[in-house]
Image (tube, rainbow, N blue to C red):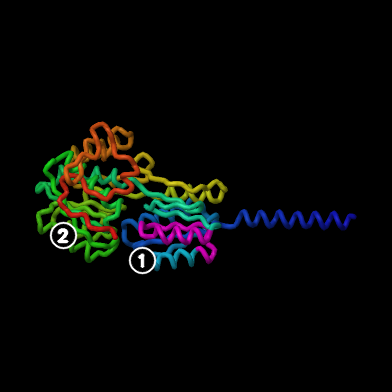
Amino acid sequence: MTRYVKYIAAAFLAIMLGAATAAEDPTRVAFVYVGPISDHGWTYQHDQGRLAVEAALGDDVVTTFVENVSEGPDAERVIRQLAATGQDVIFTTSFGFMNPTVKVSEQFPDVTFGHATGYKRTDNLTTFSSRFYEGRYVLGQIAGRMSESGIVGYVASFPIPEVVRGINAFMLGMQSINPDAQIKVVWVSSWFDPGKEGDAAKAMIDQGADVITQHTDSPAPLRVAEERGVYAFGQASDMIAYAPNAQLTAIIDDWSGYYVSQIEAVRAGTWESSDIWGGFNTGMVAMAPYTNMPDDVAAMAQATVDKISSGELHPFQGPLYNQEGELVVAEGETLDDGTLAGMNWYVKGIEDTLPSSN
C-alpha cells in the first residue's frame, strides 16, 4: 500500500512538473512582412512592434519574422510553413496577405492569427488596422497652409480602400484650408520600390507640386523633396533623418501596444477573434514632431489632432460629395465605418481616375 501511495505521489508530482514546464514554455510568435525591415516605413514600424513584444514579455516569448514576402502564392507558402513548424501566433501585415491568411488559419485551428488591414476573420484569426485617415486629414490641412502652388503630389501604392481613404482624407483636409487645392496622384503599383517612388515624386514636382506625400514605404519621395527644395511628409514612421529640411511631419503607426496585448491574451487564454481599428484616441496613430513650418501652422495641426481625438471632428463629416458632385453624407452626419472600410470612390475635387484594384 505504501509503495502504491508513493507511486501515485510520484506520478502526481511528474504531472505537476510537466504542467509547470508547459506553462512556462515561451510563446512562439512570427511576423510576415511585405517589405524589408529597413524600409523605415510600414514594415519598419511593425518590426518595432515585434521588438516591443520582446522587451515587454522577455523570456515568455520567442519571435521571428520573414521579410520581403510577395502578396499571393508566396505569402500562403510562408504562412503555412510557419504554422506547420510550431509557431503559436502569426501576424501577417499587408492587405494582400488576407486570403492566404484565412486559408491557412482554417487549416491550423490551434494557431492564433492576426491580419493587418483586412476584413476577413475566422475563429482563430483576428483583424487589426489603424485609422491612418485621421493623420492624413491633418497632413492635408498642413499642406493647405504650406503649399504656395496649391498642388500636392501623392505617391500611391495600390487602389485598395485604405489607400483611397487616405487620399480622400488628405484632400478634405486640404480643401478645409484651400477649396481650390489640387492633388496629382501617381500609382506605382508597389508598396516598396524606391526607384518608382522617387521617379513619381520627381514627375509631380515637375508638374508644379510643391508638397509631396505618399502611401508607399520607402523614404525615396522625401529624399527627392529634399533635393528639389519642396516640402514632404514621412510615411508610417518619423523619416526626418532623410529630409531634415523638407519633412513637415509624418504619420506614425504604433503597433507596440496592440501586439503586446494580443500575445498576453493568448498566454492568458482570454484571446478572442475581433476587429480592432484604432486612431489618435488609442495611440495607434500619432504625429511626428512638426518641423519646417510656422508655429501657427503647427498649432493648427495639433488642434485638429485634439478635435479628432475627442470626437469633435470627423474627417469624413458632411456635407460630403463624391467626385461626380453627388451628396454622399448630409450635413451633421459622418461616414460610417462600413463605408470607410470599403471605400472605392474619390471625393469631389480629385481629378485622378481611380484605377481598378483587380
Is any part of residue 242 visible from this angle?
A: no
Which residue type does callout 2 highlight? Answer: Glu
How far is mark 1 from mark 2, CA to CA? 31 Å
Position of 323 relative to 90 (above/below): above
Q: Position of residue 157 (x, y in %)?
A: 26, 58
Q: Residue at x 13, y 48 (%)?
A: 182
Q: Residue at x 24, y 49 (%)?
A: 345
Which residue type does callout 1 highlight? Answer: Ser
Q: Residue at x 42, y 50 (%)?
A: 127
Position of 358 relative to 262 (above/below): below
Q: Which residue is mark 2?
A: 227
Residue closer to the observer: 291 or 330: 330
Is any part of residue 170 visible from this angle?
A: yes
Residue closer to the observer: 41 or 140: 140
Looking at the figure, which quarter contains the C terminus? bottom left
Residue closer to the observer: 308 or 101: 101
Q: Quadrant of residue 86?
A: bottom right
